Image: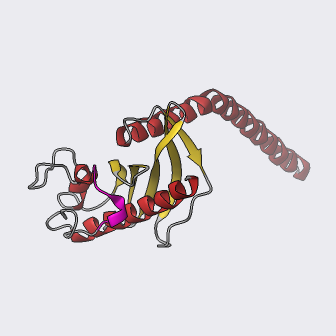
Amino acid sequence: MSKNDGIWSMVKLGLILAVYAAASCAVLAVVNNFTAPKIAQNQIEKANSAMKSVFADADAFEQVTDFDAPAVNTITIEKMFLAKKEGTVIGAAAQVSGPTYDKGTLIVGMDTKGIVTGVKFLELSDSPGFGLKASDPNFTLSNGKTFYGQFTGVDAKNGFTAGSNFDAITGATITSNGIAGLLNEGTGSMLKYLGKLN
């Protein structure tokens, strides 16, 4: 084989690989065009379902972006929505993430008076058997409520302090304190936002 034949073989192989890469990219682009709208719709439906579970009285949710950031820089308010009924704002819902024992993401709903309408966990990666009890619908506290269920009806203006104004999970103090932080930041930001609307 001559030197020119070797060069031509490498060029030919490179061209073949380029054609395969281009074809693969084209197929992925086509698949993405078909699946992206469905994935986006599924995410919207999941978010709406979660918001509806924490604010059952609302018939519509309007996303807002001009809310105050949390005071604690390790906590993030990922999204905030105004909860509406027949076009009137009746409260808000916030998706909040941050450290628990590991990390958690929850949605908390609150009416215009500052009363929590519900809490739902979207993610919690704490210790099985301890911290994960916070999101377990089968785990109940001595008051007969789930950990997250005890917050419904609570006045957010009083803040959330584990062991003081809500029941902590025995053996999961760090998780309980972390969730208190998420609730304090989420409801605090919603109180400020709703206060500006009045």
Residue closest to the far front: 198
Res 166 seen here: yes
As rendered, which of 134 and 111 lies closer to the eye?
A: 111
The magenta-colored residue range is: 152-160
Q: Is 112 on the left-hand or right-hand side of 178?
A: right
In this image, 44 relative to 101: left or right? right
Q: Quick check: 48 above or below 138?
A: above
Q: Is residue 110 magenta?
A: no
Q: Quadrant of residue 55?
A: top left
In the depicted view, which residue is nearer to us: 47 or 21? 47
Residue depicted at x 26% and y 71%: 174
Tell me residue 75's x, y (percent): 46, 66
Residue 117, how many percent across, how many down?
34, 46
Q: Quadrant of residue 157?
A: bottom left
As drawn, the residue found furthest toward the top would be 34
Q: How is the image coloured?
A: secondary structure
- Residue that lies at the very extreme toward the right in this rendered image: 4
Asked if residue 183 is positioned above or below residue 22 in the image, the reply reads below
Q: Residue at x 57, y 35 (%)?
A: 40
The main secondary structure of the magenta stretch is: loop
Q: Between residues 96 and 41, which one lies in front from this camera angle?
A: 96
Numbered circles on residues, count: 0
Q: Position of residue 170 (x, y in %)?
A: 14, 66
Measured from the top left, where is residue 126 in percent x and y? Answer: 29, 61
Q: Left or right? Give the position of 136 relative to 105.
A: left
> Is residue 103 shown to the viewer in this render?
no
The residue positioned 52% from the left and 51% from the top of the image is 80
Picture quadrant where residue 125 is located: bottom left
Q: Is residue 157 magenta?
A: yes
